[in-house]
Amino acid sequence: MSRARKIQQFLSQPFFVAAQFTGIEGQVRADRRHDHAASREIVDGKHDGVPEQAFYLVGTIEEALAKAKTIKQ
């Protein structure tokens, strides 16, 4: 269940129109191949140690991992 929630959070996107509400600048989404590869990594358990919050409103898996480092500090 944790991996499913991480994928759900990862598929959220920081939209330009929502920036005024979220405080997060909108961005263009990575292509589907990148999203598929990142989702596969999550399903395979590669990111089990990363907190779910790190996957929310990020564009790439690299951004999620960087966000995780700030969450842990």
Image: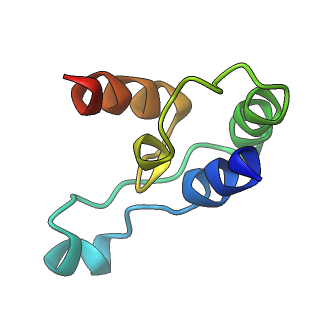
Q: Quadrant for residue 8, please give it.
A: bottom right
Relative to 73, say whether 3 is above or below.
below
Which residue is drawn at the image coordinates 56% and 23% (left, top)? 49
Which residue is drawn at the image coordinates 65% and 27% (left, top)? 48
Which residue is drawn at the image coordinates 52% and 52% (left, top)? 29
Q: Quadrant for residue 47, please give it.
A: top right
**Is 68 left or right of 44, judged from the image as shown?**
left
Which color scheme is applied?
rainbow
Count every numbered label the image shows and give the total. 0
Q: Quadrant for residue 65, please give it.
A: top left
**Is 55 left or right of 35, judged from the image as shown?**
left
Relative to 67, say whether 15 is above or below.
below
| x and y percentages locating residue 7 in the rendered image | 68, 51
| x and y percentages locating residue 22 in the rendered image | 22, 71
**Is 2 left or right of 68, judged from the image as shown?**
right
Quadrant the C terminus occupies: top left
| x and y percentages locating residue 6 in the rendered image | 63, 48
| x and y percentages locating residue 2 in the rendered image | 69, 48
Which of 24/2 is in front? 2
Which residue is drawn at the image coordinates 79% and 40% (left, top)? 36
**Is 58 left or right of 61, judged from the image as shown?**
left
Which of 11/15 is in front? 11
